[in-house]
Amino acid sequence: MPVIRMMPLCTALAVCLSVFAIAAPAPHRNAAWSVRITPQKVVNGAPVLLAVTAPAPLNSLGGTWMGHELAFDHSAGRNWFSLAGVSLETKPGKYPLKLEGATASGEKVQFERTLLVTAAKYPTVKLTVSKEFTAPSPEQQEKIKADRELKYDVFRRISPEREWSGSFSAPVNAETSNPFGTRRIFNGVTKSVHQGLDYRVGPNTPVSAVNRGTVILARPLYFEGNCVVIDHGQGLLSLYMHLAELKVKEGQQVEKGTPVGLSGATGRATGPHLHLAVRWQGVYLNPAALLKLPLPDANPKAAYTRE
Ligand SMILES: [Zn+2]
């Protein structure tokens, strides 16, 4: 009988001790993780700002989400942020966000929650372009292949440091025409998804950089025409297409508002306009959604305060 009586007691004591053992060493056991997402409704094709408050002051914070590595920057105190995105192809559903940080003493802290992705509605349009863009000749196909290899090389570069600072600003002061995500049928046959945002501008309108960064491509391409690609750091790129003239060189640092070229109709274009695209870690994101996002300024490291 005494043995039978002792068993539940031992089990209860063991549970009690293990709870105590987990809770006791944590320096901030009253603090909890918090993750705020902007915009609150996450859709396929859209960028998303993750603002994380950690349970303790951290020296570093990283994360993973849908196969992407998230780079977090420290803002103040226990607060960190990361700009991420959802590919157009992502199906609606819940996707786990995993965070892992390290405190000054090297203690690892982890957190996991799911983020809900819902489906955005994108329209379908029919367009007519010159035949060389739907049925290119063998020589044109060679150029397209060379462009593809060049773009592959340029796009896979990810500069680890964030260069962008604060919200993004529009490249031209003009109305938009064709939105991002539109399913397009060229000449009744070729189908593609519009992976950028078109601005209704006449020829030779100055086009400016949407944020701070480094020009990693500034040259003519077959479909894109005269094209500029700016690396904003942490895998975020902005692309400006169909330019009549280039105003920057590869390797050049640009600020938000720096003129990068003049608008035109080079490459596969139905007429003069600016095509702006945004790419993050291999996926195209809706530029209009990025331009609307309120984003934090870059803080000089010296101004950081840690609790
Ligand atoms: Zn376009």
Image: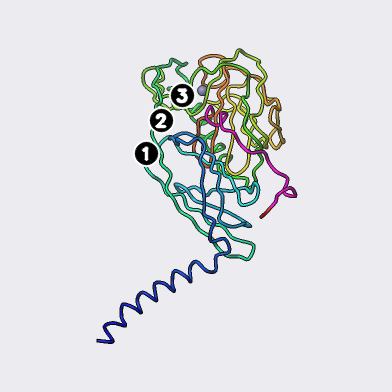
Which numbered disc, 1 or 3, marks the residue closer to the eye? Answer: 1
- Classify 73 as above or below 256: below
Q: How far apart are labels 1 and 3 at the CA level?
A: 33 Å
Question: How many residues crowd around disc 1 within 10 Å: few (fewer than 14), some, or many (20 or more)?
Answer: few
The residue positioned 43% from the left and 22% from the top of the image is 134
Furthest residue in direction right, as rendered: 302
Q: Nearer the viewer, residue 217 or 149?
A: 217
Q: Is residue 2 left or right of residue 34?
A: left
Q: Which residue is mark 1?
A: 91
Q: Quadrant of the C terminus?
A: bottom right
Q: Does the beta carbon of the residue at mark 3 sit less than 8 Å from ligand 1?
A: no
Q: Is residue 90 left or right of residue 23?
A: left
The residue positioned 57% from the left and 37% from the top of the image is 150
Mark 1 or 3 closer to N-term? 1
What amino acid type is highlighted by mark number 2?
A: Ala
Q: Does the beta carbon of the residue at mark 1 sit less than 8 Å from ligand 1?
A: no
Mark 2 or 1 closer to N-term? 1
Q: Secondary structure at mark 3?
A: loop
Q: Is residue 165 left or right of residue 283?
A: right
Q: Which residue is mark 2?
A: 120
Q: Residue 239: where, in percent of width, then height?
A: 58, 30
Residue 136, numbered label: 3
Q: Is residue 11 left or right of residue 286?
A: left
- Classify 275 as above or below 24: above
The residue positioned 50% from the left and 40% from the top of the image is 37
Which numbered disc, 2 or 3, marks the residue closer to the eye? Answer: 2
Q: Residue 71: where, in percent of width, then height?
A: 57, 48
Q: How far apart are labels 2 and 1 at the CA level?
A: 10 Å
Magenta residues, start to end: 288-305
